Image (tube, rainbow, N blue to C red):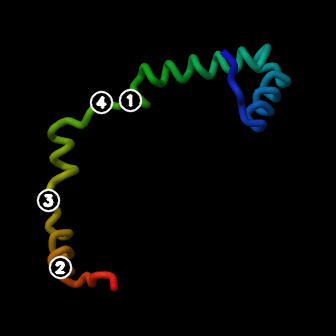
């Protein structure tokens, strides 16, 4: 596989190698992919769907906002 990186990313990998953190840029990219896999396995990038209780909280009626909508109903003017 061939991957193209931005100049800043390439420079970052070179600095990591120069500092002795990794033996090569490939080793650094392999570690980055390993960490991404671990994060994915924990569900950070794919959270579980909301429960019914969570959805009810999010989509519950808001009396204060309903008053604002009622007060402004009919005030919008069509574009001319």
Instruction: Give the SS element for disc 3.
Output: loop
User: Which residue bears the numbered disc 3?
Assistant: 61
Instruction: Give the SS element for disc 4.
Output: loop
Q: Quadrant of residue 43?
A: top left
Image position, residue 26 (x, y; %): 73, 16
Above or below, comparing residue 62 to residue 15 in the picture: below
Cα separation, mark 3 vs mark 1, equals: 28 Å
Instruction: Give the SS element for disc 2.
Output: loop
Cα separation, mark 3 vs mark 2, equals: 17 Å
First in sequence: mark 4 or mark 2?
4
Q: Residue at x 76, y 32 (%)?
A: 12
User: Which residue bears the numbered disc 4?
Assistant: 48
Above or below, comparing residue 50 to residue 69 in the picture: above
User: Which residue bears the numbered disc 1?
Assistant: 46
Q: Residue at x 43, y 19 (%)?
A: 41
Question: Any mark on residue 73, and which?
Answer: 2
């Amino acid at each position: 596989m061939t991957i193209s990186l931005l100049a800043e990313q390439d420079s970052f990998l070179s600095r990591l190698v120069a500092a002795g953190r990794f033996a090569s840029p490939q080793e650094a990219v392999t570690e980055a992919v390993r960490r991404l896999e671990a994060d994915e396995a924990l569900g950070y990038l794919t959270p579980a769907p909301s429960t019914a209780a969570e959805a009810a909280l999010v989509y519950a009626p808001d009396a204060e906002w309903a008053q604002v909508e009622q007060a402004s109903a009919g005030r919008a003017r069509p574009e001319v």
